[in-house]
Amino acid sequence: MRRTKPLALLLGLALLLASATAWAGLPQAGQPAPEAALPAMPQKEARQYLGIGDKHYFTFSDVDAQVVILNIFNVFCPYCQAEAPLINQLWERLNTDPALKGKAKMFAIAVNNSAFEVSVFRDKYGAAYPITPDVTFEVSKLTGKSIATPSFVVVRQGPQGGQVIYSHSGPIEDLDAFVDMLKDKGGLR
Amino acid sequence: MSARAALAWALVAAALLLGQPAPAASLSELVYRGDGQMPAGDSQVKVQVGQAAPDFALPAVAGGTVSLSDYRGKSNVLISFVPSAWTPVCSQQWPGYNLAEKLFKERDTVVLGISVSNLPSLYAWTKEMGGLWFPVLTDFWPHGRVASLYGVLRGDGMSERALFLVDKQGVVRWAKVLDINKVPHLDELFEALDKVAAP
């Protein structure tokens, strides 16, 4: 008993440390898909693309795709600005690669940005993917109060519900590797 | 050490390593968050809409000195006072003006970014942001002299987050002291700017 008590404490500490950082911030890979309702983008075409109809709020499971990619960003964030061309390339790949088209879809949430600010971003970078201006920080339902931008959450939908297959804070370094991940972990090969 | 103890320590070490939060973009990691929110200021704005904007000359991060009067007859000027380099809101506000560069230029408007932080600090910070299209000036010494001239120097030595729009004749057309803890949206700024210089 004397020897196992400190060991139990150490093991408990180990578990606590490992899990504490998972509670804060993004949903982690391996977890069930988040059920938080996120605000929809104003554009009808964007909502049609995602298959969410006229919903003002939607969840990952509402999106008509096997793999759903969320990009959380802020139009003022210099890293998001630098990455804008790469995200455009991702959008292009999703719409042209036969393994992905119609099966993997993406949307973005612009944290604390107004519709006007999102339009300035769209015009400057030619961003054509769905973007929700989230002035009231509703994405915090998913991320908690503190979020680094850009961040990415990818969900694979399934008959038993969805699962997070990828979760990352920081820019996407390698687009090819990211697309390979979508296909491998998203079951789209 | 027993095998069980070694296993337990290995688990703790693994948790410490694996449990690290995913690295944020580095500007975010380098920004100083201090005690959180900054208190409301105690300054009294000295320059009103309709008055001539007080002239000043300050050292620029890009080198040399920039004066407000350099722009007389040529550009509208948006003077943007920010409290300090390396703080959260400021680290978003000026990259936001990078985003809107085309909109400013369509309206014949240059931004002058002013902070009481010193030149080396401003240099490192704006470089980490990826550079800015507009001049950044230091109001470090005499400390806050220009902020004080405009009535936006706080008792804690930083300036307020404040915007002054000066037209080509050197007249203040819009003046706003903003919530120091919030990133100001572009909407209100361009609404004001469009009244002076719509494209």
Image: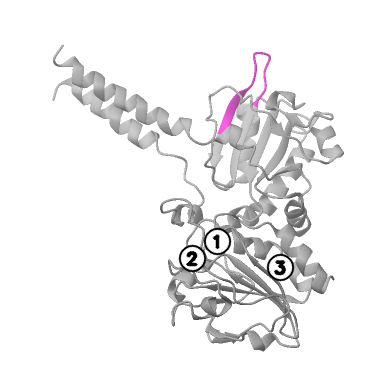
Mark 1 — residue?
B90
**Is B5 on the left-hand or right-hand side of B123?**
left
**Cβ atoms at labels 3 and 2 below 8 Å apart:** no
**Mark earlier in primary sequence (1, 3):** 1
* Magenta part of the chain: A156-166
Please check whether the numbered discs 1 and 2 fall on a single chain: yes
Helix, strand or loop at label 2? It is loop
Corner quadrant of residue B188: bottom right
In the picture of the structure, the residue carrying the numbered disc 2 is B85
**Mark 2: which amino acid?**
Ala
Mark 1 to mark 2: distance in Å? 7 Å
**Numbered disc 2: what chain?**
B
Label 1 marks a residue whose chain is B
**In the image, are marks 1 and 3 on the same chain?**
yes
Q: Name the secondary structure under disc 3.
A: helix
Of B134 and A137, nearer the camera is A137
Residue B160 screen position, x and y as percent: 54, 66
Q: Which mark is residue B101?
A: 3
Mark 3, Cα crowd under 10 Å, few <14 / some 14-19 / many 20+, is: some
Q: Nearer the viewer, mark 3 or mark 2?
A: 2
